[in-house]
Amino acid sequence: MEQQKTHPYPSSVRTVCYVTLQKVMKESKKDDAYTWKAVENLMQTTDHAHQCDIVNHILGDDHRRDSILPKETLYTARIHHDNRNLLVSGIPRLAIRFHDVDHTADQFLGNAFRHEINLPDKMLPTALLATKE
């Protein structure tokens, strides 16, 4: 999108779209064009998380004048999967998230605050304290 040319995301962030590639419906005769489909528990794990680039967005026409809810925006994204670029349209905002690029989150900073947590042995179960010799 044009906005990314002038205001790109930081290099430590990647865009991830939650899509079940087995369940998307083919939209046209193009092999790599699909429509997003809601599936139960889609975003519960990262199994369906794929790195993606947002191509464009469309404001939905489901907005009512008597509603305070905003129009739903649906996105089209290029999904990177198995060395292929699949174009998926109709992705709701809830299915798009930002993830940290591996080893770039604050917990990996050299000056991140860490210290040992000392617990008395009697607070831990004996099975956990038993060591195999």
Image (spheres, grey):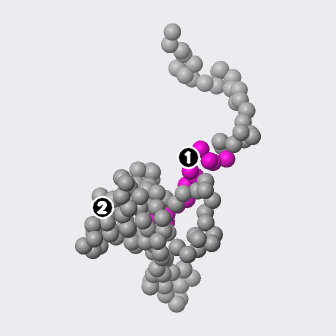
Please, is residue 86 above or below residue 48 in the view? below
> Which residue is tagged 2?
23
Q: Residue at x 52, y 73 (%)?
A: 1
Going by the numbered disc 2, the residue's amino acid type is Lys
Going by the numbered disc 1, the residue's amino acid type is Asp
Please, is residue 23 above or below residue 65 in the view? above
The residue most toward the top is 133
Magenta stretch, residue numbers: 94-106
Q: Is residue 95 magenta?
A: yes
For residue 8, which quarter of the picture? bottom right
Chain-order first, disc 1 or disc 2 = 2
Q: Nearer the viewer, residue 88 or 44?
A: 88
Q: Residue at x 48, y 85 (%)?
A: 63
Label 2: which secondary element: loop
For residue 31, which quarter of the picture? bottom left
Q: Around disc 1, counting alpha carbons within 10 Å, would you say few (fewer than 14), some (14 to 19), or many (20 or more)?
A: few
As measured in the structure, the alpha-carbon distance from the residue carrying label 1 to the one carrying label 2 is 28 Å
Residue 6 in view, yes or no: yes
The residue most toward the bottom is 65
Q: Nearer the viewer, residue 32 or 95?
A: 32
Q: Is residue 47 left or right of residue 66?
A: left
Q: Is residue 88 left or right of residue 66?
A: left
Q: Is residue 68 magenta?
A: no
Disc number for residue 102: 1
Please, is residue 4 above or below residue 124 in the view? below
Instruction: Please provide percent x and percent y for residue 40.
Output: 37, 59
Q: Residue at x 66, y 43 (%)?
A: 107
